Amino acid sequence: MNDPISLPPARILGIESSCDETAAAVVENGRVQLASIVASQVDLHAKYGGVFPEVASRQHILSIFPVVEQVLYQAHLTLNDVDAIAVTRGPGLAGSLVVGMNMAKGLSLAADLPLVGVNHLEGHIYSAWVSPGDVTHLPPEPKFPLLALLVSGGHTELNLVRGHLDYQRLGGTLDDAVGEAFDKVARLLNLSYPGGPAIQKAAAEGNAEAFNFPRPRLEGSWNFSFSGLKTAVLRVVREFEEKQKPLPVENLAASFQAAVVDTLVGKTIQAARTFEVENILVAGGVSANRALRTAFLAQTEFPVHIPSLSLCTDNAVMIASAGYYRYAKGQRDSLDMDVLPTWPLSQL
Ligand SMILES: Nc1ncnc2c1ncn2[C@@H]1O[C@H](COP(=O)(O)OP(=O)(O)OP(=O)(O)O)[C@@H](O)[C@H]1O
Ligand SMILES: [Mg+2]
């Protein structure tokens, strides 16, 4: 277990630009959101059905200054009231990451503030510590050791978290990330981008038992695989197309979602038992999924922590929160810090 970190009072300005959201936030003591701005590019990328890296980095350049300016204004603070700047160092798109990184370096230099590089996935995990409301509404603090299920657009993995900033990767997806599977299946069903919210909406009107899709268990490992499930949906779609029958979009969405939820919950509980953890934590964009949240909260074997809805998909609050714990541990990065487009949690 890590040495306990002493936690000084501190306000952290967080900056996030790893993918298609330009975001800034101010968080107090790692847990209280004072202000948060997320400038989403989703409309720009929707016509491509996914993130177009070149378009993303150009848009970050246009948004980063106003987003940081606005978040300080919203928090009624200046840079003089901030103790450090935390910035996403990776993983993510190189051309997007450098925009946030250069902004953070510029501010650090101009205001003589410490610079702290943060792993985006670690940020997702720390989003469960934060209250987007006021200090009187802090979520219960997750207890270590905990089992963290990370489910996002680019990642699906199980990590054993023994203490603050201490991760052991147990396993992950062998093919598609679960968010990616939502996005691809949504495309098959002619639903809008991003696919997760669209599938959730369609599924609410459908029967989850209409199609019995596979729930791959991959016994003997802590890995996941979602490509077979995606192919199973494709096969049904083709059959309906060949017969020129209208696609039962709602039933397909509900049955797909149920297979994903069963798979994720089943494996996570199994791992939580094996590693005898105190708590389960679910984070990343897909943790916004209502069916997934409901299924985890319905089991009573382990207390489960899931971030507030506004903190599930990319934001800078989570970067400021993780940055706070790194700052408290004494991490200070130099102006030479480079971005790391590939940066597994296990290498921290
Ligand atoms: N309600 C929902 N149900 C299911 N999936 C959802 C929901 N809301 C968002 N998602 C999915 O979450 C993903 C986006 O999550 P996030 O913003 O964390 O991804 P990312 O930052 O692109 O990836 P990563 O964090 O791995 O770098 C998308 O694939 C989206 O479809
Ligand atoms: Mg993310």
Image (cartoon, rainbow, N blue to C red):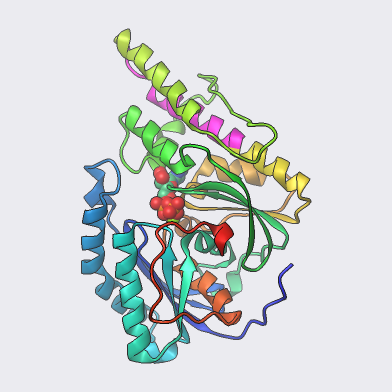
Q: Position of residue 80 (x, y in %)?
A: 40, 92
Res 298 → quadrant: top right
Q: Residue at x 66, y 64 (%)?
A: 140
Is 240 on the left-hand or right-hand side of 63? right
Task: Answer yes or no: is residue 228 visible.
Answer: yes
Is 278 on the left-hand or right-hand side of 40? right
Residue 207's place in the image compared with 59, above or below, is above
Q: Which residues are magenta?
A: 245-263
Q: Position of residue 11 (x, y in %)?
A: 49, 83
Task: Answer yes or no: is residue 78 visible.
Answer: no
Could you tell me what secondary structure mostly forms the magenta stretch? helix
Res 111 → quadrant: bottom left
Residue 305's place in the image compared with 245, above or below, is below
Res 82 → quadrant: bottom left
Q: Residue at x 57, y 37 (%)?
A: 224
Residue 233's place in the image compared with 57, above or below, is above
Q: Is residue 262 part of the magenta span, yes or no?
A: yes
Residue 66's place in the image compared with 188, above or below, is below
